[in-house]
Amino acid sequence: MQLQRLLSYTRKAVDEYEMIREGDHIAVGISGGKDSLTLLYALHGLRRFYPKHFELSAITVDLGFEDFDLSGIRELCRKLDVPYKIVKSDIYDILFNIRKESNPCSLCAKMRKGALNQAIKEMGCNKVAYAHHKDDIIETMLLSLIFEGRFHSFSPRTYLDRMDLTVIRPLMYVDEMDVIGFRNKYDLPVVKSKCPVDGYTKRQYAKDLLRQINQEHPGARERMFHAILNGNISGWPERIIRVPNPPRKCKKNLPD
């Protein structure tokens, strides 16, 4: 995927769900994966021409895995002129050595977000951008249906009143396959996940299920996504679709 196409999808999401306002300071949560690095590129590119001016910073919560080398990401942020902060934590040690969690994902996410949000506020940011793409949104809906019995997915824009912080998801219109293509084309410095349960989660189950459904019923994935957009899900902001002005009709000079 070309950068221009990525920026087009990103601006569509930002505009339709009013994700950015004048003077925002947005922190990009960098996990080290392809999604968050693509988001960093997208917002950096958008900042150059978007009519509403905003600041951009990047932040990583280091969970405490051994050999978690972030030097490539640090160099990328330097080239993009984006301030980068690494927050050290003992989350891995707490989950796997002290508590010996067999299903650590939920607690890990809660602890990681807590450390992330606290650091973001200390940096003076009022918004944080998560790198969830279109497939993530659909997979979350499937997980909600199967395990919670409700039609739901995370919102494009969410205000956390306790933290006075707004979460935005500018990649919501981007397919995961496009993210993979962007990573390969621009040689992003991806850091492989060190998590011992990576690939064995309910999220992975939903990913495999979505792939199977779409193979057996081509187009099902897109129909699911549009069902989410039009589903009046609780907590979702109103979607603003601006219809472009039609071209003016030129009056022909008729003979007298």
Image (cartoon, grey):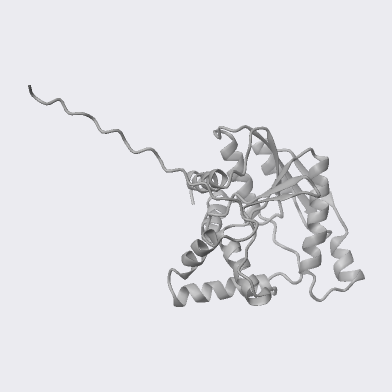
Please tell me which residue is depicted at 86% across the width and 70% down the height of the picture.
Answer: 96
Q: Residue furthest top?
A: 256
Q: Residue furthest right?
A: 98
Residue 199 vertical placement versus 91 (above, below): below
Give the x, y percent position of residue 231: 54, 62
Residue 127 vertical placement versus 100 (above, below): above
Give the x, y percent position of residue 66: 82, 61
Instruction: Left or right? Give the position of 156 relative to 226.
Output: right
For the image, the number of numbered tags is 0
Please tell me which residue is depicted at 60% across the width and 69% down the height of the picture.
Answer: 151
Specify the quadrant of the image occupied by residue 109: bottom right
Comparing 54 with 20, the one in front is 20
Instruction: Left or right? Give the position of 189 relative to 8.
Output: right
Instruction: Left or right? Give the position of 219 relative to 153.
Output: left
Give the x, y percent position of residue 47: 60, 36
Please tell me which residue is depicted at 56% across the width and 35% down the height of the picture.
Answer: 50
Instruction: Left or right? Give the position of 69 relative to 255.
Output: right
Specify the quadrant of the image occupied by residue 251: top left
Q: Residue furthest left?
A: 256
Quadrant containing the C terminus in the rendered view: top left
Comparing 103 with 93, the one in front is 103
Comparing 234 with 128, the one in front is 234
Residue 160 vertical placement versus 25 (above, below): below
Please tell me which residue is depicted at 80% across the width and 57% down the height of the picture.
Answer: 112
